[in-house]
């Protein structure tokens, strides 16, 4: 158990809909990272937050947004969903603002768009 | 931005053999190179890492080597066991500030007994 909690574990929805994925980092970790894992693209970095502020942005679509709340949990919002958004979405946390130390990954939220 | 390429995508070995996975990166400012192991149904977990001021690091049966000039690094697993079967990802920091990790596409290692 990494200490990172992601909900829901599974989610099935239709194209055009909007979903919210939630992540609770390990106790004491200030950084939260979101990654998308699909079969052909591996782990794609989406976005990072540190202590409530956005620190780095990767290949995150404009239809996606995220935020980190004062209690340090984070939410990833996916809107106008398309079939291609079906993937496993991972959240990871770390103590520091940089990624030059261990990232602790949750077990992921599997999104299926029909 | 950083780009990390990983080879091979699949690797099958017999128990007791060695396995080698290789990665190249594009950003010469990257300074941290971890390897993660992902078992079925779980999130990736760090198994070993190396920083740019070190050429080699070993931890029991696993070792990582780094060639900064050539911008490539490798994972070596010796005396493989069935429980080593998993997907392995290499990664490099996004930039010199190391704000995020960019992962390779993964290598599925299968160890048969």
Image: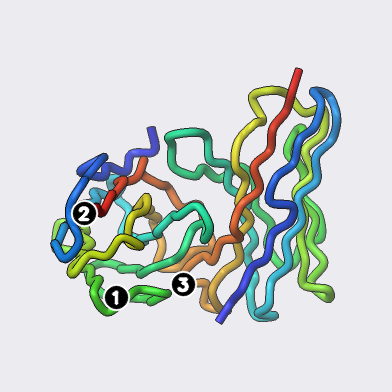
Horizontal side of residue B108 vs A37, given as left or right: right
Mark 3 lies on residue? B99
Instruction: Assess disc 3: are there few (<14), some (14-19) or many (≥20) residues with their C-alpha within 10 Å of its C-alpha.
Output: many
- Which chain is mark 2 on? A
Instruction: Write down the residue under mark 1.
Output: A54
Image point 26% across, 45% down: which residue? A6
Tell me the CA gap for discs 2 and 3: 22 Å
Which residue occupies 53% across, 40% down?
A: B38
- Residue at x 70%, y 80% (from the top left corner): B28
The image quarter containing residue B61 is top right
At horizontal 49% and vertical 33% (from top left) the residue drawn is: B40
Q: Are marks 2 and 1 in contact (CB under 8 Å)?
A: no
> Label 1 marks which chain's residue?
A
CA gap between label 3 and label 1 equals 11 Å
Q: Which mark is residue B48?
A: none
Where B31 sits versus B35, above or below?
below
Rate crowding at label 2 as few (under 14), some (14 to 19) or many (20 or more) other CA atoms within 10 Å.
many
Q: Is residue B92 above or below residue B34?
A: below
Image coordinates for residue A52, horizontal then vertical, percent: 22, 69
Residue under numbered circle 2: A21
């Amino acid at each position: 158990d990494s200490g990172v909690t992601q909900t829901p574990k599974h989610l099935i929805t239709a194209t055009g809909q909007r979903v919210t994925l939630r992540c609770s980092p390990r106790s004491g970790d200030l950084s939260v990272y979101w990654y998308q894992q699909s079969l052909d693209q591996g782990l794609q970095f989406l976005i990072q937050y540190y202590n409530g502020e956005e620190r780095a942005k990767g290949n995150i679509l404009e239809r996606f947004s995220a935020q980190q709340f004062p209690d340090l949990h984070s939410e990833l919002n996916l809107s106008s969903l398309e079939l291609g958004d079906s993937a496993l979405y991972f959240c990871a946390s770390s103590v520091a603002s940089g990624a030059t130390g261990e990232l602790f990954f949750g077990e992921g939220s599997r999104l299926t768009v029909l | 931005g950083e780009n990390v390429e990983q080879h091979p995508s699949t690797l099958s070995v017999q128990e007791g053999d060695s396995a080698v996975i290789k990665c190249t990166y594009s950003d010469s400012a990257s300074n941290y190179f971890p390897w993660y192991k992902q078992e079925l149904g779980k999130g990736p977990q760090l198994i070993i890492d190396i920083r740019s001021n070190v050429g080699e690091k070993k931890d029991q049966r696993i070792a990582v080597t780094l060639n900064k000039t050539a911008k490539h690094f490798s994972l070596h697993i010796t005396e493989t066991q069935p429980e080593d079967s998993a997907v392995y990802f290499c990664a490099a920091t996004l930039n010199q500030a190391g704000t995020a990790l960019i992962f390779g596409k993964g290598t599925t290692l299968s160890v048969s007994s």
